[in-house]
Image (spheres, rainbow, N blue to C red):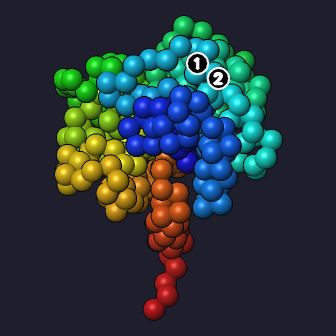
Amino acid sequence: MGVLNVTPDSFSDGGIFFRGNRLDINLAFERAEQMVAEGASIIDVGGESTRPGADSVGVQEEMDRVLPVVEKIAAELDVIISIDTSKPELMSGGAAAGAGMINDVRALTQKGAVEAAAMSGSAVCLMHMQGQPKTMQQAPSYASVINEVIEFLSSRIEICSSAGIDKTQILIDPGFGFGKTPEHNLVLLNELSKFLALGCGLVVGLSRKSIIAAVLNRPVEDRLPASLALAVMAVERGANIVRAHDIKATSDAIHMAIAVKEAVMTGSNHD
């Protein structure tokens, strides 16, 4: 899943598709095209930053950023389009524009979101987040981060299923960095396979995140090797979709990890 943030303030790629205060749709499309060429199966388009401390964006502004980009990608590229949003209006508008997936950091908890997602017919990714982006990293606390995240996601799966969203259309994301300390994130990744018991596809987003800074003290632009290691570990523990910024390198790393997993599963032996 390639990250395409059409925002001025996302933590890693914010503002790179803007000319002054104006979003350049062609620049954003060119990046999507490049990611597909490098191996992305899904393009995740986001119009509101959810980095720690980020301010919220109005519905119309978010739609104005996202929908033209979705429409252009849908018209010109053979790729699944995901919309990274919590707003029901954009969920509906995105599906009409050609998106096939909703990636919601708030797990469809906003008023009208479950209904909009069900009506859209889109696949949905339900993510766990403690608190809200503005304050979520101030003092995250859990009695058991694994149990609490699993319990939350299980309850959201049930609610979505009751609303008519088929379980085969539901994916889950533990929400690395969303209301978690570095230690919480390390525990979540180490025990990621426990989430497979929920019976949904598993999405992981660790690319360039602050967990790398916490362990290695690396700036955002120097986090690729660690991001690749985290992506491989996620796949080894059962992740089905890896959300990433650096597509070519991540795709290569994941394909090697999958080749090893498949060799072990089939008992292949090449002495």
Q: Are marks 1 and 2 in contact (CB under 8 Å)?
A: yes
Residue lying furthest top in this view? 111
Residue 64 circle label? 2
Residue 135 circle label? none
Q: Residue at x 45, y 29 (%)?
A: 49
Residue 23 place in picture, x, y as percent: 60, 33
Q: Is residue 224 above or below residue 44?
A: below
Q: Is residue 45 above or below residue 79?
A: above
Is 112 positioned to the left or the right of 56 in the image?
right
Residue 213 place in picture, x, y as percent: 23, 48
Residue lying furthest bottom in this view? 271
Q: Residue at x 19, y 51 (%)?
A: 217
Q: Quadrant of the C terminus?
A: bottom left
Q: What's the amino acid at mark 1?
A: Glu
Q: Residue at x 44, y 17 (%)?
A: 56
Residue 61 circle label? 1
Q: What's the amino acid at mark 2?
A: Asp
Query: Secondary structure beneath disc 2?
Result: helix
Task: Please state which of residues 252 and 195 is positioned toward the viewer in this rendering.
Answer: 252
Dot 1: few (<14), some (14–19), or many (≥20) neighbours within 10 Å?
A: few
Measured Cα–Cα span from mark 1 to mark 2: 5 Å
